[in-house]
Image (cartoon, rainbow, N blue to C red):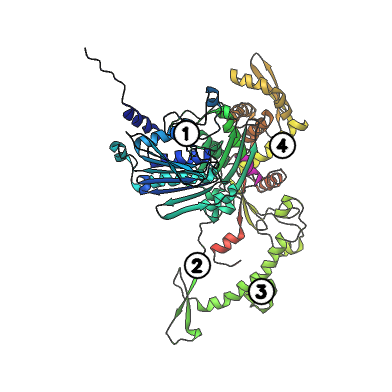
């Protein structure tokens, strides 16, 4: 019988192997630029022609190679970056597989020119599939220049598989963008044939982001800087206004290597959860630094993905880093209407070419009404409103307006501002049942009226000095209870109320285990519980737990705790306080009386971080008056 198995000729074996590393022009760019970075280059320029199919040319000022190294560099498994199996455990360079140049040489015409600083003369290598490499002396600058021509000329199947030029070019651009973000200390120059795509000089990461993403991003970047025991996270997240409907503005770098990882992306999204709708994706550039031994980068031929020893730890660190950044920047979600400034409401229509100014009609653009006369009356009113002193010149109608203006000014300005609460609402608030108190009364009363109003049993509106503030009632109460619970546990003040009739609660085994773990803190929180034969007898509950809700409160707090434990990385007391806050807080949908609303606002602004709930969600959104003015076409 004939034997059927044979060893493939090297030429074919190389082509197959190359398929793993070089899938498209972008892969070549990626491998070559990585080599330049590994060679310590401070300047890297990339030129592509025909979306990389005709030519990819890389020029760096890195270490260069000796003649012998150059000769070896294109051989399979030839690398200067690792030597032993131990090295594989601690990879500090971007490359290490020793495959890129060999693979590229198997599917294209490759030319390398290189010179080391210490060498007088450089060398040039030309490689072509099925031919021996040729090396000759060559006069060149310090560093390395690589030309890759006619990619896939000998692999028609692969060539056919490529997408349109535009798509291939976009892949290359995206990779160049990633490198530029990963290494702001390196100057990158990137050309598409003769047109310059970008040239970014060495700078800080922030400047680099602005250079690449545009000036507008400058005011929208929130710095992230967080060090945990085993990992460090730094970089920037974009304010919600920078979020996109696609994931294109999301960059993770792990020890300088661009990676993609869905779970970690979620870790960034989580603290943004209530700042963004589900289909928006926050912008971020985050560098994760972690001990090289704690991560395996050798799980993917193109090294886009890595495997962490402890992905949960990394997840938690990122989530905490972002939540902390949002909290630090006290991100109040400032609502902006669509970028549309109201047009002047009136159009001037000239009756005839020779008309005098008096013949010009003012027409309301919306209704078509001709409103000449009334307009003349209104104009001074507007002036006086902006400038109360001028009211003496106005008609009786406008003086009435300015009177109102002064009234409201008295209502909201001019009181010594001490606390955050005072700053927003003035010093004291009187609980008036009337939304529209008499004007006379306001003149007399030195007190400040806080106007509150509830929308759909969900949001509380409060008039402030600068506009209106919308408060999410559940998130706000959560923040209040969370701080109160933490205080009760840490400072051990009595926060419990005794029940007249103890309540029996049957705990399942996992609830029971959790209860045992947390019993001391639950007690500090205000619970008084004893367990007999697996049945919990609740004799007392925290003040904020309503009568009849004792069993539900206990069970929900335990299950919330468990849920948070998996996603939050915080100590158990903090977690318990957050669970308590979440479960005991007034719910969305609950109607509040005016005095309840006022109490809520007061309590909220007595907390340390009124703007964010314990999970980093926003509590307050400010609508500045200017936004309304803009919309209504007033110049404020
Ligand atoms: P790897 O990067 O995995 O080591 P490559 O095939 O990409 O494998 O490169 C092989 C070797 O060639 C590298 O280890 C390095 O020593 C050398 N080399 C490649 N590109 C450059 C460059 N731009 N400058 C200096 N040396 C380089
Ligand atoms: Mg390499």
In this orientation, which residue lies closer to the viewer: 378 or 316? 316
Residue 2 pos. (x, y %): 22, 14
Circle number at residue 484: 4
Q: What residue is at 29 percent from the left and 40 percent from the top?
A: 160
Sequence order check, earlier mark of 4 and 2: 2
* Prevailing secondary structure class for the magenta stretch in the rendered image: helix
Q: Are marks 4 and 1 in contact (CB under 8 Å)?
A: no
Q: Is mark 1 within 8 Å of ligand 1?
A: no
Q: Is mark 2 within 8 Å of ligand 1?
A: no
Q: Is mark 3 within 8 Å of ligand 1?
A: no
536 over 181 or under it: above or below: above
Residue 268 pos. (x, y %): 55, 39
Q: Which residues are magenta?
A: 322-330
Write down the quadrant of residue 380 in the picture.
bottom right
Say which of marks 4 and 3 sits in front.
4
Circle number at residue 68: 1
- Per the model, the C-alpha gap separating discs 3 and 1 is 92 Å
Task: Say which residue label 2 marks.
Answer: 343
Say which of marks 4 and 2 sits in front.
2
Q: Are marks 3 and 2 in contact (CB under 8 Å)?
A: no
534 over 408 or under it: above or below: above
Write down the quadrant of residue 538 in the picture.
top right
Task: Say which residue label 3 marks.
Answer: 399
Write down the quadrant of residue 17 in the picture.
top left
- Per the model, the C-alpha gap separating discs 3 and 2 is 27 Å
Sequence order check, earlier mark of 3 and 1: 1
Q: What residue is at 65 percent from the left and 73 percent from the top?
A: 384
Q: What residue is at 64 percent from the left and 27 percent from the top?
A: 554
Say which of marks 2 and 1 sits in front.
1
Among all residues in the image, which is located at the extreme left? 1
Q: Is residue 411 magenta?
A: no
Sequence order check, earlier mark of 2 and 1: 1
């Amino acid at each position: 019988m004939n034997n059927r198995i044979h060893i493939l000729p090297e030429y074919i074996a190389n082509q197959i192997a190359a398929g793993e590393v070089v899938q498209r022009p972008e892969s070549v760019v990626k491998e070559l630029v990585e080599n330049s970075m590994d060679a310590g280059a401070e300047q890297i320029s990339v030129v592509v022609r025909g979306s990389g199919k005709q030519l990819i040319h890389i020029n760096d000022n890195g270490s260069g190679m000796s003649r012998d190294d150059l000769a070896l560099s294109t051989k399979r498994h030839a690398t200067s970056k690792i030597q032993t199996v131990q090295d594989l455990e601690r990879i500090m360079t971007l490359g290490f597989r020793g495959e890129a140049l060999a693979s590229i040489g198997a599917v294209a015409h490759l030319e390398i020119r290189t010179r080391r600083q210490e060498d007088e003369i450089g060398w040039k290598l030309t490689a072509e599939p099925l031919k021996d490499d040729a090396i000759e002396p060559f006069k060149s600058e310090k560093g390395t220049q690589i030309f890759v021509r006619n990619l896939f000329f000998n692999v028609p199947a692969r060539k056919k598989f490529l997408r349109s030029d535009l798509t291939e070019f976009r892949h290359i651009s995206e990779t160049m963008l990633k490198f530029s973000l990963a290494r702001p200390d390196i100057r990158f120059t990137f050309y598409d044939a003769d047109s310059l795509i970008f040239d970014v000089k060495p700078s800080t990461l922030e400047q680099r982001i602005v250079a690449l993403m545009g000036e507008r991003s400058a005011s929208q970047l929130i710095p992230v800087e967080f060090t945990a025991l085993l990992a460090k996270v730094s970089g920037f997240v974009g304010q919600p206004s920078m979020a996109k409907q696609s994931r294109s503005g999301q960059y993770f770098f792990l020890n300088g290597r661009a990676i993609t990882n869905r779970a970690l992306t979620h870790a960034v999204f989580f603290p943004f959860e209530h700042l963004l709708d589900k289909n928006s994706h926050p912008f971020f550039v985050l560098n994760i630094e972690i001990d090289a031994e704690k991560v395996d980068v050798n799980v993917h031929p193109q090294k886009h993905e890595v495997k962490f020893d402890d992905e949960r730890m990394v997840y938690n660190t990122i989530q905490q880093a972002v939540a902390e950044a949002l909290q630090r920047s006290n991100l109040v979600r400032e609502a902006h209407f669509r970028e549309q400034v109201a047009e002047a409401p009136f159009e001037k229509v000239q009756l005839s070419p020779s008309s005098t100014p008096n013949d010009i009609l003012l027409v309301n653009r919306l209704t078509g009404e001709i409103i000449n006369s009334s307009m003349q009356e209104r104009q001074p009113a507007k002036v006086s409103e902006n400038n109360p002193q001028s009211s003496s010149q106005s008609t009786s109608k406008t003086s009435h307006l300015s009177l109102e203006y002064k009234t409201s000014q008295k209502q909201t300005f001019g009181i010594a501002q001490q606390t955050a609460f005072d700053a927003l609402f003035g010093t004291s608030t009187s609980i008036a049942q009337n939304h529209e108190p008499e004007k006379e009364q306001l003149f007399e009363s030195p007190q400040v009226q806080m106007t509150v109003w509830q929308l759909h049993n969900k949001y509380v509106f409060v008039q402030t000095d600068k506009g209106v503030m919308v408060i999410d009632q559940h998130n706000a109460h959560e923040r209040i209870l969370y701080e109160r619970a933490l205080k009760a546990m840490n400072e051990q003040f009595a926060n419990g109320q005794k029940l007249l009739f103890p309540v029996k609660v049957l705990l399942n085994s996992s609830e029971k285990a959790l209860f045992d773990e947390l019993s001391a803190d639950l007690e500090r929180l205000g619970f008084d519980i004893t367990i007999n034969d697996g049945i919990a007898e609740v004799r007392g509950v925290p003040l904020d737990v309503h009568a009849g809700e004792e069993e539900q409160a206990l069970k929900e707090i335990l299950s919330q705790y468990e849920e948070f434990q998996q996603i939050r990385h915080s100590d158990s007391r903090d977690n318990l306080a957050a669970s308590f806050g979440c479960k005991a807080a007034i719910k969305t949908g609950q109607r509040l009386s005016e005095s309840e609303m006022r109490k809520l606002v007061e309590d909220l602004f007595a907390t340390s971080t009124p703007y964010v709930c314990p999970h980093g969600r926003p509590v307050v959104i400010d609508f500045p008056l200017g936004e309304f003015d803009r919309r209504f076409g007033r110049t404020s």
